[in-house]
């Protein structure tokens, strides 16, 4: 399950498949909340919508776009909060939750971290053998996240876990040089 | 119920009373999550902790500190996400949810928006007739938020609702001048 977090439009998509097998689009859509609705009510609607997607489609992992405070200042708080809800829902369902930056997603899908929206949409359609990219753009972005999760998987998470295990084995000491790591 | 949102320490407090009556501290504490825990697990723990407070104490309104992206960049995303969880829980329980800035809280408690932590703690203790301020500081901040909510109430929210109703009555048109508003 891919989630492109947002308060006005939160993209959600389910993609089935694995590395080396063709991918299938199961579902893609958007959870919308009206801008004039009270913020806590909007978040509740996003939460309940994501919960419904998760219960309906029973994904085995969740990929969410990693958000950065320096971009889109006006909408950042709501976007971060929507992402947080997706994280909680993934954790509550006992699923691995991974965050991917927009450029990681673009690179996984199109081979370039600087691909524009149209190029990503085109590649998403080609990968899934669709006539055209899912709409709106937030749904297509969620599909791209789900594909990125299948292809890159939790590679970053597994690396971090391995590094944490290694640190723990060294008694939490931070290595002074590469020799410390391999010793 | 006052919530001082945070990922490492999320302050929660229950204060009972009303304007013109003495206030009573019902409970104050902190939900902690370890820094080396995965982010989605930390958020789930905050969510479940806040839900437990809410189910145990059945507050009739929720006050949460309003967070700003320009401050504390490193921790902002987690803080905003914890605040979002508190908002969702308030909304799910059908409670009014109000956000207060730190300076609104300080002004409501101490008469000055620039009071420091020690002054706020001192005033909180005095208002609630305690020997000393609740600890840690995050719990005291949550108590201050709860007091602010009782005294200021949802004044801002009610003003916004009145303004929204007025806008709706004008057909959603944004007034060009104050004359538009009073016409």
Image: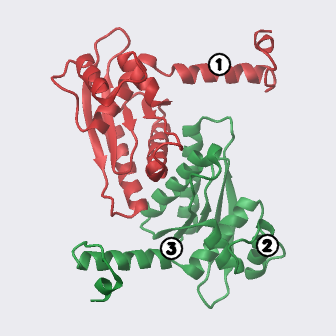
Chain colours: A green, B red
Residue A114, percent across and down?
A: 71, 71
Q: In front: A150, or A152?
A: A152
Q: Is residue A63 above or below residue B50?
A: below
Figure quadrant of residue B120: top left
Residue located beneath label 1 in the image: B162
Give me the residue at 57% from left, 75% from top.
Answer: A149
Farthest residue to the right: give it: A131
Give me the residue at 38% from left, 50% from top.
Answer: B7
Residue located beneath label 3 in the image: A60
What kind of element bears circle 3?
loop
Residue located beneath label 2 in the image: A119
Residue B107, percent across and down?
A: 42, 20
Image check: B21 left or right of A7?
left
Residue B183, percent across and down?
A: 80, 9
Figure quadrant of residue A158: bottom left
Q: Is residue B117 above or below residue B83?
A: above
């Amino acid at each position: 399950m891919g989630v492109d977090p947002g308060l006005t439009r939160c993209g959600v998509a389910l993609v089935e498949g694995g590395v080396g097998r063709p991918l299938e689009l199961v579902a893609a859509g958007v959870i919308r909340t009206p801008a004039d609705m009270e913020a806590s009510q909007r978040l509740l609607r996003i939460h309940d919508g994501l919960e419904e997607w998760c219960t309906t489609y029973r994904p085995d992992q969740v990929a969410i776009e990693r958000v950065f405070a320096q971009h889109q200042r006006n909408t950042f708080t709501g976007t971060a909060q929507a992402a947080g809800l997706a994280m909680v829902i993934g954790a509550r369902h006992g699923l691995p939750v991974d965050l991917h930056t927009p450029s990681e997603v673009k690179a996984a899908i199109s081979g370039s971290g600087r691909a524009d929206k149209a190029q990503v949409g085109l590649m998403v359609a080609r990968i899934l053998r669709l006539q055209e990219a899912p709409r709106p753009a937030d749904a297509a972005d969620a599909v791209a996240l789900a594909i990125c999760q299948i292809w890159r998987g939790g590679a970053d998470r597994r690396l971090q876990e391995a590094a944490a295990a290694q640190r723990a084995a060294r008694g939490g000491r931070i290595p002074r040089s590469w020799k410390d790591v391999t010793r």
